[in-house]
Image (cartoon, rainbow, N blue to C red):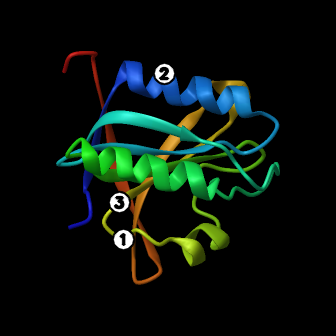
C-alpha cells in the first residue's frame, strides 16, 4: 500500500540534505528504509549519470542497499533525489521511470534556500502528494 504520510527524524533529514549538498552541482540520490513509512535508515547512492539534470543510481550500490535493507528487516519506504536547478516536483522522466509503486518519491530543490522537500506516491502514472512529517530525533 502506498504511503499517505512519511515520517522521518530531523537528524536523518539533515543527513539527506548534507548528502545532496555534497553532490552539487550534480543531482544526488539515495534510498530510505524503514517500517510502516517511518524512515529508519538513509542510504546515499552514487549518481552514475553524473549530470546536473538527471540521476541514475549506481546499479551495484543500489542492489547492495536493497539487500542490506532486506537483511535488516526493513522495507524500501522512499527513494530520494535532488533537482538542484528545478522545482521540488516530479519531472516527466521521474514519472515515466518510477519502478517502486509502494514507495514514496522525495524530490529536493532550492539548495540556496536550504533544500525544500516534497514527497509523492505514483499510481498509474499519476503523482499524489504525500505529507512529510518531521519528528525530533528519538521520535
Q: Which image quarter is the N terminus in? A: bottom left
Which of the two residues, 100 or 122, is positioned nearer the viewer here?
A: 100
Q: Quadrant of the C terminus?
A: top left
Question: As rendered, which of 72 and 93 lies closer to the eye?
Answer: 72
**Quadrant in which residue 13 is drawn:** top left
Where is 49 relative to 73, above or below?
below
**Coordinates of residue 56 in the picture (x, y in percent):** 67, 59
The percent position of residue 42, horizontal first and vertical second, equals 42, 35
**Position of residue 139 in the picture relative to residue 118 (left or right):** left
Question: To which residue does mark 2 refer?
Answer: 14
In the image as oriented, which residue stretches furthest toward the bottom?
124
Mark sitting earlier along the chain (3/2): 2
Alpha carbon distance from label 3 to label 2: 20 Å
Relative to 121, residue 131 above or below: above
Does 132 appear above or below 8?
below
Q: Which residue is mark 3?
A: 103
- At 64% from the left and 53% from the top, the residue drawn is 58
Please rate how many residues cluster around mark 3, counting C-alpha atoms within 10 Å: few if below 14, some from 14 to 19, many from 20.
Answer: many
Q: At 26% across and 58% down in the image, what residue appears?
A: 3
Element under label 3? Answer: loop
Assess whether mark 3 and mark 1 are in contact (beta carbons under 8 angstroms). yes
Q: What secondary structure is found at the residue carrying circle 1?
A: loop
Decide if residue 18 is on the left or right side of residue 128: right
Q: Which residue is found at the position 74% from the left and 42% from the top? A: 84
Which numbered disc covers residue 101? 1
Residue 40: quadrant of the picture: top left
Q: Residues within 10 Å of mark 1 (few under 14, many from 20)?
A: some
Q: Are marks 1 and 2 in contact (CB under 8 Å)?
A: no
Amino acid at each position: 500500500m502506498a504511503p499517505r504520510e512519511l515520517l522521518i527524524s530531523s537528524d536523518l533529514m539533515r543527513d539527506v540534505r548534507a548528502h545532496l549538498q555534497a553532490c552539487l552541482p550534480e543531482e544526488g540520490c539515495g534510498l530510505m528504509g524503514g517500517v510502516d513509512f517511518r524512515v529508519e535508515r538513509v542510504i546515499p547512492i552514487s549518481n552514475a549519470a553524473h549530470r546536473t539534470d538527471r540521476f541514475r543510481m549506481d546499479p551495484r550500490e543500489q542492489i547492495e542497499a536493497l539487500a542490506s535493507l532486506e537483511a535488516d528487516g526493513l522495507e524500501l519506504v522512499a527513494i530520494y533525489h535532488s533537482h538542484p536547478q528545478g522545482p521540488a516536483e516530479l519531472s516527466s522522466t521521474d514519472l515515466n521511470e518510477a519502478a517502486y509503486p509502494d514507495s514514496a518519491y522525495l524530490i529536493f530543490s532550492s539548495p540556496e534556500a536550504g533544500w525544500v522537500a516534497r514527497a509523492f506516491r505514483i499510481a498509474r502514472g499519476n503523482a499524489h502528494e504525500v505529507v512529510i512529517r518531521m519528528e525530533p530525533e528519538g521520535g
